[in-house]
Amino acid sequence: MKATPEHIAAIRRLGYNETEATFLYLVATHSGYFTRSQFLRYFQQSKGCLVHRFTTKTLTQGHATAKEYGYQTLVFHLFSRQIYGAIDKDNLRNRRQLSKELIRTRLLILDFVLCDPNRQHLETEADKVQYFNRELGIPLTLIPCRTYKSRKSGSQTDRYFVDRFPIFLTEKPPQTPTFVYCDSDLPGLFGYVTQVRNCEALLRRLPGFNLIYASPDAAKFHRAQGFFSRTFDSNTPVDTAQLARYFYIRQLWESHKTESLTRADRDLLRDGDKRFQGVLFESLYLISLEVRMSESSLSFAIRLQDQPKSLAFNESIEKVGTTAGELLREIRGLEF
């Protein structure tokens, strides 16, 4: 989805010009936070009175707050229900105050989006669920989900794609979803690995997808790509012994014969539910319900039926490199 003329017009009625209104739409939709340097880059300006006039307007009209962090950097939080209501997104959690680390991540996400704001992003949780569940027919059980429990009523609510990392569709048909992970310059790949694992069941069900790993630290690209290849490389042989064991345990579980299952069996079942996804494995499982399949027969069936997917891993230092590299220097050492 992209900003509609009606949404931009609604923000303009609050006292902003068209470019300012479009910038606020992008901030509200993808981040909730922004810096002056991001505004200037969007306007393709290095300095000037434009940013002072704009930020003063957001503060005096009560649409945003500003807080100074390390290196005398102001980070603005766009929180006003007037803005979010004008674009029919008044329930977005971007209005909420976030932790230091989440603010850092949201600023990196915005930096990526601003590099090419005309992409066809799946902007909200509802947009993503609509596309993957209703259009592609992927079960909700395979979509990254977190359950929240109300302290007052005890009721539970499932929320999907709570990380809010960008997902957009390629322009040329067939449209392919592109997942983006915006990493910081902090050492390690724990956040990236966790994100890929959380989305793995969904990604394995898709006929094709792209993954962009965006980071200001080029040294991390090789390790990130290596993990991607090890996880999704179709040439990686399937452990047919583990697959056969998974089928056997799953049959016991689904027939409610669980008294003999050990903790290790249950762990293998949970791991297999995530790892052995897709039409191929499901069809083999259905066959195994009728005929017990040996490891050799499973291996032959996989070689015969498995079709390569359209996968792509892309490195993106230009997206959050020179731009977010500057951004990271601005907000490094955030302190409340």
Image: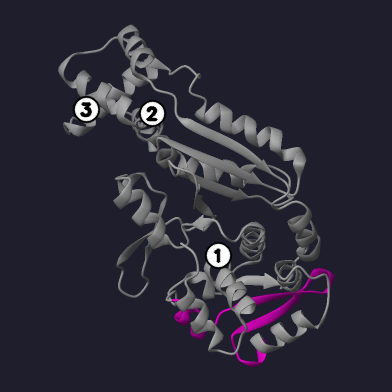
Whole-percent x, y for residue 115 in the image: 67, 58
Disc 1 is placed on an element classified as helix
Q: Is residue 312 left or right of residue 47?
A: left
Residue type at the position of mark 1: His
Instruction: Give the crowd class for mark 3: few <14, some 14-19, many >=20 residues within 10 Å.
Output: some
Question: What label sits on residue 252 in the rendered view?
Answer: 3
In primary-sequence order, the first of circles 3 and 2 is 3
Please tell me in which quadrant of the rendered image residue 151 appears: bottom left
User: Can you see residue 135?
Assistant: yes
| Residue type at the position of mark 3 | Leu
Task: Indicate whether residue 249 is drawn in magenta.
Answer: no
The answer to whether 4 is drawn above or below residue 138 in the figure is: below
On screen, residue 214 above or below 98: above
* Badge number at residue 264: 2
Residue 261 visible, this orientation: no
User: Which residue corresponds to the image point at 38% horizontal and 13% vertical from the top-left?
Assistant: 303
Q: Which mark is residue 30?
A: 1
Residue 173 location, quadrant: top left
Query: What is the span of residues highlighted in magenta in the rendered image?
Result: 59-87
Q: Quadrant of residue 189?
A: top right
Q: Picture coordinates of residue 267 (x, y %)?
A: 39, 33
Disc 2 or disc 1, which is closer to the eye?
Answer: 1
Residue 73 vs residue 261, the one in the foreground: 73
At x 60%, y 32%, the residue is: 227
Residue depicted at x 50% and y 69%: 3
